[in-house]
Amino acid sequence: MNYQLLAIVVFFTSFFSMKFAALWIEGEKGLGFLWRSPVFAPRSERRNLKSNQASLQRIWQRLIFFSFLAIAGIEFYQFLFTQFDFGLMVKAWIFSPYIYIFTNLLGVGAQCLGLLTKELPTDLHNHPYLAQNISEFWGKRWNIWVSDWLALISKSLSPNKLLERLFLAFLLSGIFHEVIVAIPYYLYSGENYFGLMTSFFMIQFLAVSIDKKILKTLGPRTRRLFLWFSLLAPMPLFINPSVMAFFGV
């Protein structure tokens, strides 16, 4: 089994484990969730789009658009990284926009599968590039499906303490990414990159805490600068060699 296939198997195993955990907390019975839309928590905004022809057309247009971007993008990065000898850190920063393209493709693909269900999920991302601060980026704009699940789990573990909920949410996110990327890569290649993704999300926890406790009284420009610095500076921890190997770059 190659690395990519192993990572996909682990991803879906983790995916359904997340759904089981959310359903256990909510007390829902039955296995209907296995074929329903990928919404992790009750607070997700769900929209019945099947009766709206314009919305359905938009989904197919987005599928074609992000499929093209994903194929063209990976070809571009493979060419770029073979022609120029970038260091690992520089490659991570250059490659970071592709994560947005790839995750959008996954999200719109799930929406297409959702056409087989009663409801379709909202978009995976909510225009994260429009975020005014890092709290808004992680809480309302990036990967809404998983952020819903993390909010549900962390609130059940620490219902009264915001800081603890934030810590648990980012810790669980780090562990989830280690499971779906670092572990399959270790099993495949024997190379150990454990802890890098968790470290990235712990830095994000500190950044969100600083934003909520210290920067909330400052102007929007300062908070936006802090947002992009906090995201991009530690990006090589997230886009590490195990991630680059998955995409073949």
Image (cartoon, rainbow, N blue to C red):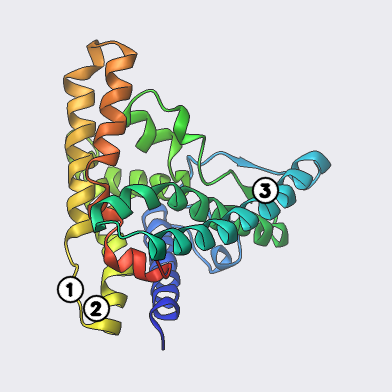
Position of residue 217 in the picture relative to residue 29 (left or right): left
Task: Look at 24% across and 39% down and name the residue there.
Answer: 159
Identified by mark 1, the residue type is: Asn
Quarter residue 175 falls in: bottom left
* SS type, badge 3: helix
Instruction: Indicate the position of residue 50 as horizontal and vertical percent values.
Output: 77, 48
Mark 2: few/some/many CA within 10 Å (<14, 14-19, 20+): some
Image coords of residue 234 (percent x, y): 22, 45
Q: Nearer the viewer, residue 93 or 66?
A: 93
Quarter in which the C terminus is drawn:
bottom left
Mark 3 vs mark 1, CA separation in Å:
36 Å
Indicate the amino acid at tag 2: Tyr
Q: List the residue tagged with mark 1.
A: 192
Q: What is the quadrant of residue 53 in the picture?
A: top right
Pointer 3 and pointer 1: residues touching (CB < 8 Å)? no
Q: Amino acid at mark 3?
A: Arg
Which one is nearer the viewer's eye here, 198 or 51? 198
As helix, strand or loop, the secondary structure at mark 2 comes to helix
- Residue 82 higher or lower than 200, as above or below: below
The answer, for residue 203, to whether it is visible in the render is yes
Q: Which mark is residue 62?
A: 3
Q: Are marks 2 and 1 in contact (CB under 8 Å)?
A: yes
Distance in Å between CA atoms under marks 3 and 2? 34 Å
- Residue 55 position, x and y percent, is 75, 41
The label shown at residue 186 is 2
Helix, strand or loop for disc 1? loop
